[in-house]
Amino acid sequence: MKRKLIWLTAIGAVVAVAYAQSLTVRGALGFGLAGAPDAEQPNAQFAISVKQYEYNGQTRTGGSFAFQTRTADAYVGIQMPRAESLTVDAENKVAEFRGVAYAIQRTRQGVQRARGIVVVQVDDNRNPRDRQGDPDTIRVAFYTDENSDPAFTYEGVVRVGDIVVYERTYSR
């Protein structure tokens, strides 16, 4: 009887180890107002929620991005309903993501709409409650054709709000 119990325990341990999985979650999350590094007032607002799940050798990426800014002669809005790729450097707290996006540019001459690819890079440089160090940064490039120069670019620092870049691993 003891021998059967020992074998069942050994088999149960092997099965438990075989089914043990780890889940890695990477992402960028944030919202707020951004402006040029040398400007006093922000001129853009953004909302980021992009995640990547990695488990059992599979990777799932999703999330969205919204961005609006005003320039001297136009208002530009970019909407990315679903992220297609995400790269996270958790050690340096830098994330880059891309996906199909829609841009709207409003000027006095009218409204232009375009479909393309947006590439966004964000740096999580500090906690919003800590005013020491460099502020978080955001860089946006919108391409109407993947092999061309960007139709729109923006680079700014976060004035109000925060960007968080993270990577966490869970085991069961």
Image (cartoon, rainbow, N blue to C red):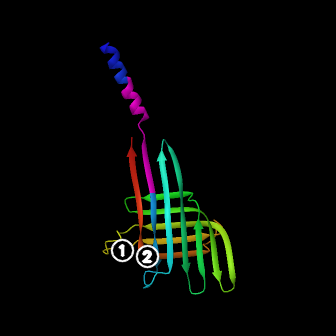
Q: Depth check: 148 or 30 in front?
A: 30
Q: Position of residue 161 (x, y in %)?
A: 42, 72
Q: Which residues are magenta?
A: 11-26
Q: Position of residue 34 (x, y in %)?
A: 46, 76
Please say whether residue 44 is one of the residues in the magenta stretch: no
Q: Are marks 2 and 1 in contact (CB under 8 Å)?
A: yes
Q: Earlier in the sequence, mark 2 or mark 1?
A: 1
Does 7 sit left or right of 42 as displayed? left
Does 102 sit left or right of 63 as displayed? right
Q: Is residue 101 above or below residue 76?
A: above
**Tag 1, which secondary structure?**
loop
Q: Residues within 10 Å of mark 1 (few under 14, many from 20)?
A: few
Image quarter (top left, top right, bottom left or bottom right) of the C terminus = top left
The amino acid beneath tag 1 is: Asp
**Tag 2, which secondary structure?**
strand
Q: Position of residue 152 (x, y in %)?
A: 59, 75
Residue under the image location 57 percent in, 57 percent down: 84
Q: Is residue 128 above or below residue 85?
A: below
Residue under the image location 38 percent in, 26 percent down: 12
Q: Which residue is mark 2?
A: 157
Q: Which numbered marker is on residue 134?
A: 1
Q: Position of residue 8 (x, y in %)?
A: 37, 20
